Amino acid sequence: MEDDNLLRGKQKRYLRAHAHAMRPLFSVGKNGLTQAWLEQLTGALENRELIKINLQQSADVSVEETKAFIEDNTDIQVVQTIGRVLVLYRVATEEENQKISPIVENM
């Protein structure tokens, strides 16, 4: 991931506030982290730009491992981790799906 795509503090605060009322959309379970799972995440973020995921108790990976796996293999940014929940952000490529990113970009 390129450094110029990193979010600033003000942008992260806005995204955290926006994600506060959201429910986790994806889970990491005993199947762990796979390329297919990453593709599903990317697809969901294409439509929403901001989602939450949670790690189930049966997951064989830690929150830190999950965060590193997502950030190392995609252009998705982990905005926040709270316990076993991660808030993820990615700018949509389709303009009609860009509802949050124009606001974040102008901060």
Image (tube, rainbow, N blue to C red):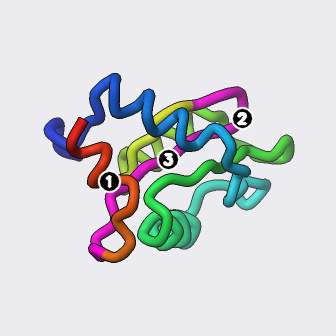
Q: Is residue 46 above or below residue 105?
A: below
Q: Amino acid at mark 1?
A: Ser
Return the residue nearer the eye: 18 or 87: 18
Please say if the residues under marks 1 and 3 sit with CB atoms less than 8 Å apart.
Answer: no
Going by the numbered disc 3, the residue's amino acid type is Leu
Residue at which label 3 appears: 88
> What label does residue 84 carry, if any?
2
* Residue drawn at (53%, 42%) of the image: 18
Secondary structure under the numbered disc 2 in the rendered image: loop
* Residue with the mark numbered 1: 101
Instruction: Choose the circle earlier in sequence order: 1 or 2.
Output: 2
Judging depth in this view, the residue of 103 and 90 nearest the camera is 103
Q: Secondary structure at mark 1?
A: helix
Mark 3 vs 2: CB contact within 8 A:
no
x and y percentages locating residue 95 in the rendered image:
27, 73
Q: Could you tell whether 13 is left or right of 91 in the image?
A: right
**Residue 27 location in percent, x, y?**
72, 55
- Quarter of the image where the C terminus is located: top left
* Quadrant position of residue 62: top right
Crowdedness of circle 1 by 10 Å Cα count: few (<14), some, many (20+)?
some
Relative to 37, residue 19 above or below: above
Gap between marks 3 and 2, in whole Å?
Answer: 13 Å
Between the C-alphas of marks 1 and 3, the distance is: 13 Å
Question: Which of the 4 image quarters holds residue 9?
Answer: top left
Q: Which residues are magenta?
A: 81-95
Of circles 1 and 3, which is in front?
1
